[in-house]
Image (spheres, helix red, strand yellow):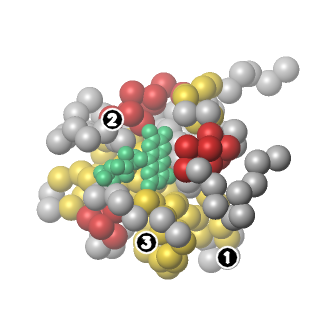
Amino acid sequence: MTAVDGRFDTALLRQAFGCFPSGVTAFCGVRDGSPEGMAASSFTTVSLDPPLVSVCVANTSSTWPKLAALQRLGLSVLADEHAPVARSLASKSADRFQGVDWTATESGAVFVHGATLWLECAPFKRIEAGDHEIVVLQITALAMYPDVSPIVFHRSGFRELLPGA
Ligand SMILES: Cc1cc2nc3c(=O)[nH]c(=O)nc-3n(C[C@H](O)[C@H](O)[C@H](O)COP(=O)(O)O)c2cc1C
């Protein structure tokens, strides 16, 4: 085991966290008439009643402060064909949504077409947590497409689920 008095090298921790496979979400909303958003693999389901989910955002994120002011946010659980979308929504490009097939609801939530799940959310709670913030969101509407296979993020790469045996 590698242990260093409660402090770990960041690169080592990144590698360790990367052993945990996760889905990838697009966390997006409309701000001043334009879509804003980011890729987030830290999505977690939290509570059934009330219906809550969470995303962890880095304190260094320049996108989160823009999303934080919005009344409604969209979370799209990305499909296996969405690796380019995930990369684009994490890029430093001025227009992250170029080449992304997206739609906005009247409430201002932004969703990616072809995703396996859309969750329209309202801000619920923000919790400081080290160099990240845990953003708890209350689900206000959803649409699911269970036959769409989700993308998997594992060890810094995108993978696809194999069909069940
Ligand atoms: C697959 C993937 C998952 C990511 N997950 C998160 C995440 O959960 N939280 C986070 O703060 N950033 C995450 N990022 C990074 C953001 O998408 C984005 O690159 C980062 O916030 C920097 O951009 P910004 O300054 O516009 O926010 C992820 C990136 C990728 C490619």
Q: Is residue 142 left or right of residue 113?
A: right
Query: Circle 3 is placed at which residue position?
Result: 122
Query: Circle 2 is placed at which residue position?
Result: 88
Of residues 26 and 138, the one drawn nearer to the viewer in this rendering: 26
Q: Amino acid at mark 2?
A: Ser
* Residue 6 pos. (x, y %): 69, 64
Ligand 1 within 8 Å of the CB at mark 3: no
Lower position in the chain sequence, tag 1 or tag 2 = 1
Q: Quadrant of residue 3?
A: bottom right
Q: In front of the other: label 2 or label 3? A: 2
Question: Where 102 falls versus 83 (above or below)?
Answer: below
Q: Is residue 155 visible?
A: yes
Q: Amino acid at mark 1?
A: Asp
Lower position in the chain sequence, tag 3 or tag 1 = 1
Crowding around mark 1 (Cα neighbors within 10 Å: few <14, some 14 to 19, many 20+) is few
Crowding around mark 3 (Cα neighbors within 10 Å: few <14, some 14 to 19, many 20+) is many
Q: In front of the other: label 1 or label 2? A: 2
Q: Residue at x 43, y 71 (%)?
A: 122
Secondary structure of the residue carrying numbered label 2: helix
Q: Quadrant of residue 161?
A: top right
Label ID, residue 21: none
Q: Amino acid at mark 3?
A: Ala
Crowding around mark 2 (Cα neighbors within 10 Å: few <14, some 14 to 19, many 20+) is some
Q: CA distance from mark 3 to mark 1?
A: 15 Å
Question: Where 149 falls versus 50 (above or below)?
Answer: above
Label ID, residue 49: 1
Q: CA distance from mark 2 to mark 3?
A: 24 Å
* Residue 112 pos. (x, y %): 39, 41
Of residues 56 and 131, the one drawn nearer to the viewer in this rendering: 131
Q: Residue at x 55, y 43 (%)?
A: 11
Q: Is residue 110 visible?
A: no
Secondary structure of the residue carrying numbered label 3: strand
